[in-house]
Image (tube, helix red, strand yellow):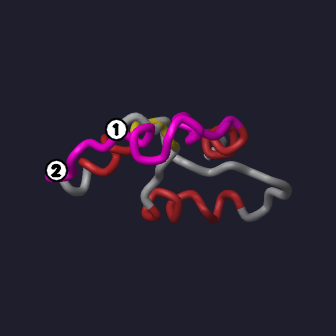
């Protein structure tokens, strides 16, 4: 319940994938920044919280978010 990522359902990516085909280079694609537990509870409310720090130790990065500015800029054009 302490790890942040940019999760996105594949249905959401499929809606925008054809808009990205003409662009070249590296592009981070993902959804809004959110805690892993919150994302998991959208599909299964029985999920229990778990601390990544306790399981993986102090060296595990808790913020695994990406810069989505290029992706968002392209999607806003449509």
Q: Residues within 10 Å of mark 1 (few under 14, many from 20)?
A: some
Q: Residue 70, how many percent across, how many down?
A: 72, 40
Indicate left or right for 31 with 20 as reference: left
Q: Residue at x 47, y 37 (%)?
A: 4
Q: Is residue 57 magenta?
A: yes
Q: Residue 5, how many percent across, how many down?
A: 50, 42
Q: Which residues are magenta?
A: 45-69
Image quarter of residue 69: top right
Q: Earlier in the sequence, mark 1 or mark 2?
A: 1
The residue to which callout 2 is attached is: 45
In this picture, is 69 found above or below 11?
above
Q: Residue 14, how many percent across, how many down?
A: 51, 65
Viewer-side residue, 24 vs 31: 31
State the CA–CA distance, disc 1 to disc 2.
14 Å
Q: Residue at x 74, y 51 (%)?
A: 27
Query: Mark 1 near mark 2, Cβ–Cβ under 8 Å?
Result: no
Tell me the element at label 1.
Answer: loop
The residue to which callout 1 is attached is: 1
Indicate the quadrant containing the N terminus: top left, top right, bottom left or bottom right: top left
């Amino acid at each position: 319940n302490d790890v942040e990522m940019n999760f996105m359902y594949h249905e959401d990516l499929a809606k925008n994938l054809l808009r990205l085909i003409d662009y070249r280079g590296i592009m981070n694609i993902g959804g809004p920044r959110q805690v892993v537990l919150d994302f998991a509870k959208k599909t299964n409310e029985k999920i229990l919280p778990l601390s990544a720090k306790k399981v993986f130790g102090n060296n595990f990065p808790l913020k695994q978010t990406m810069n989505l500015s290029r992706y968002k800029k392209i999607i806003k054009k449509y």
